[in-house]
Image: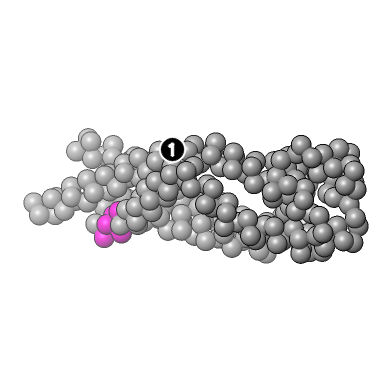
Amino acid sequence: MGCFKFLKITMFCFNGLIFLAGAAILGVGIWVKVDGGSFIDILSKAAPQLKQIVNVGYLCIAIGSFLVVIGFLGCYGTVKENKCMLMIFFIIILLIFIAQVVGAVVILAFSGLADIFIGYVQVWAVESIKNDYGKISDITTIWDSVMKEFKCCGFNSYNDFTNSSSHYLTSKYPKECCTTSYACPLSGVNKSIPGCYVTLLIFLKRHTKILGIVALGIAVLEIGAMAASMIMYYYIRKQEKTV
């Protein structure tokens, strides 16, 4: 009985935290959708380069709602010792666990597949530089942010901007490609700056394994939650049979 009570308290606390986290995320999502102007103002102060490209309202609402449901099922099933709720909780965590493991395996293997991924992106990236950079504000903001963050120029090199729509209009290259802090002609281009293909490839190879390890760590917690819910389920079932 003592072990069961300890397991019950642990399950309640664990799922209570999930419920509160979900409620907080859901609240942020609703705030973003209801009062998006204030959110954008705050975001623009913290990270101006994200102002044009981030819209997280619906994502927060979806994630928050999902966590609230998970937390409620776990807490209610634990407090009321409800077998149905505990089984639903187990099934949902099991599905998440399966997706998590598959994702972790893909992430761990992704370091060897990074070249293939970048290859698919390359066609879109070069075309967006040639046709949209300097003309479409969102695309321009994205590329400026990427080049500034990763200290790169173009996708392959500065040549991606040669004969592009922006180069045709201004005859200049973005400041991230230049030896100066402002847009420059070809004579001012720093040709030693690598393309974003190289820097993104290095970034992916350095960080995907860390993400995979974190995902596996979360999977261990999910195994614990599934085990606890099943132990409680079978204990409650056994108690019902003895009554």
Taking 189 as reference, is 24 above or below it?
below
Taking 27 as reference, is 200 above or below it?
above
Q: Residue at x 88, y 47 (%)?
A: 186
Pick out the residue farthest to the left: 242
In front of the other: 112 or 40: 112
Left or right: 110 as drawn, with respect to 98: right
- Is residue 23 something one can see in this rendering? no
Label 1: how many Cα within 10 Å (few below 14, some 14–19, many 20+): some
Which residue position is annotated with label 1? 213
Q: Residue at x 28, y 40 (%)?
A: 7
Left or right: 176 as drawn, with respect to 233: right
Residue 80, image x and y in percent? 29, 54
Give, as a three-letter code, the residue at label 1: Ile
Magenta part, dominant SS = helix
Left or right: 54 as drawn, with respect to 132: left
Q: How is the image coloured?
A: one colour
- Is residue 228 something one can see in this rendering? yes
> Is residue 22 located in the magenta-colored stretch of the structure?
no
Secondary structure beneath disc 1?
Answer: helix
| Residue 221 in which image quadrant | top left
Q: Residue at x 67, y 64 (%)?
A: 34
Q: Across the whole image, how many numbered discs are drawn on residues?
A: 1
In front of the other: 102 or 132: 132
Q: Residue at x 76, y 64 (%)?
A: 131
In front of the other: 109 or 56: 109
Residue 43, image x and y in percent? 73, 50
Residue 36, image x and y in percent? 71, 61
Quadrant of the drawing holding the N terminus: top left
Q: Which residues are magenta?
A: 84-90
Residue 122, image x and y in percent? 63, 55
> Is residue 87 located in the magenta-colored stretch of the structure?
yes
